[in-house]
Amino acid sequence: PLPENTIKAIAAYIIGARPKSKHRRLFLNLVAPYRPISATSVGQHITECIRKAGLSGTAYWLRHTYAQNLLEAGSSVYEIKEMMGHNNINSSEKYLNIHIKLMRRVIFDEEL
């Protein structure tokens, strides 16, 4: 479920800011031709916002942290797969592997 203010912001975008396009995807490139925005472009925009906020990190880091927090909160790798939009469970398992390595480092003082 989306918060009400998010729904209102999306509606305002559709009504007032979204360029006219034959494409049905919600978010489009900012310049013509107005095609669906790519995952790479989204990542670049997020990374730029992180930088402008004076923080370090990237969009990948943000996704990784989200997945790691889901795992630490008790979500299964299958649930993480769905929430992350992964097509393959192998993409999600890397977060579990990193989590196990971190636990071993803390428990056994091992190098990563």
Image (cartoon, rainbow, N blue to C red):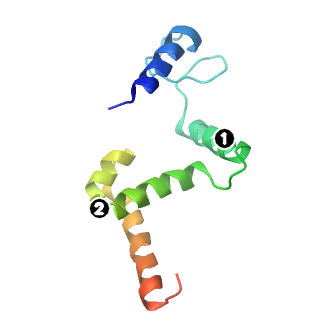
Q: Residue type at mark 1: give it.
A: Cys
| Quarter holding residue 72 | bottom left
Q: Is residue 37 visible?
A: yes
Crowd rating for badge 2 (residues with CA inside 10 Å; few <14, some 14–19, many 20+): few
| Image position of 92 (left or right of 20) | left
| Image position of 91 (left or right of 31) | left
Q: Residue at left 39%, top 76%?
A: 100
Q: Is residue 109 above or below residue 100?
A: below
Give the x, y percent position of residue 68: 42, 61
Q: Dot 1 corresponds to which residue? A: 49
Give the x, y percent position of residue 30: 64, 22
Q: Residue at left 50%, top 21%?
A: 9
In terms of secondary structure, where does tag 1 sit?
helix
Q: Residue type at mark 2: give it.
A: Gly
Give the x, y percent position of residue 106: 46, 83
Q: Is residue 86 visible?
A: no
Q: CA distance from mark 2 to mark 1?
A: 29 Å
Q: Residue at left 26%, top 55%?
A: 78
Q: Dot 2 corresponds to which residue? A: 74
Q: 103 or 5: nearer the eye?
A: 5
| Quarter holding residue 92 | bottom left
